[in-house]
């Protein structure tokens, strides 16, 4: 799995951090998403899928490994 985030779309809701704190964080100054791990291990894939699905701004894109 490869994760990309569109910081320009991010509204700072923090849903991704709640769903997958090992993979996502937020900048202190504005709450915009920070991607901690663009290629997380398989044990985190379910949490990452949940984070992407609950993102109100659709700022998280997932691509499955080839």
Image (cartoon, rainbow, N blue to C red):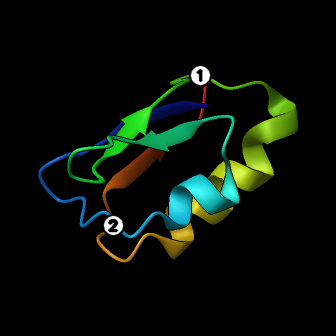
Which numbered tag is attached to residue 39?
A: 1
Residue extending farthest left: 8
Give the answer, above or below, for where 58 lies relative to 49.
below
**What residue is shown with label 2?**
58
Q: Which residue is located at x 64 percent, y 61 percent? A: 18
In this rendering, position of residue 45 left or right of residue 39: right
- Classify mark 2: helix, strand or loop: loop
The answer to whether residue 37 is left or right of residue 60 is right
Q: Position of residue 35 (x, y in %)?
A: 44, 32
Residue 60 percent across, percent down from the top left: 39, 52
Q: x and y percent of residue 65 in the render?
A: 61, 25
Element on which disc 1 rests: loop
Residue in the picture at 58% in, 60% down: 51
How far apart are the two marked residues, 1 and 2, measured between alpha carbons? Answer: 19 Å
Position of residue 23 measured from the top left corner of the image (x, y, whole percent): 60, 35
Name the residue at 69% across, 35% down.
22
Q: Nearer the viewer, residue 6 or 36?
A: 36
Report the residue that reaches farthest toward the right.
43
Mark 1 is surrounded, within 10 Å at the Cα level, by few (under 14), some (14 to 19) or many (20 or more) other residues, namely some
Q: Nearer the viewer, residue 25 or 41?
A: 25
Instruction: State the residue in front, 64 or 30.
Output: 30
Q: Quadrant of the N terminus?
A: top right
Quarter holding residue 10: bottom left
User: Is disc 2 surrounded by few (<14), some (14 to 19) or many (20+) residues within 10 Å?
Assistant: some
| Mark earlier in primary sequence (1, 2) | 1
The tag on residue 4 is: none
Viewed as shown, does residue 45 lie left or right of 7? Answer: right
Pointers 1 and 2 in contact (C-beta within 8 Å): no
- In the rendered view, would you say 21 is above or below 34? below
Q: Residue at x 74, y 53 (%)?
A: 47
């Amino acid at each position: 799995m490869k994760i990309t985030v569109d910081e320009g779309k991010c509204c700072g809701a923090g849903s991704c951090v709640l769903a997958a704190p090992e993979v996502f964080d937020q900048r202190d100054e504005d709450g915009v998403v920070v991607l901690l791990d663009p290629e997380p291990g398989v044990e985190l894939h379910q949490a990452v899928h949940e984070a992407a699905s609950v993102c109100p701004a659709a700022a998280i894109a997932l691509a499955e490994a080839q």
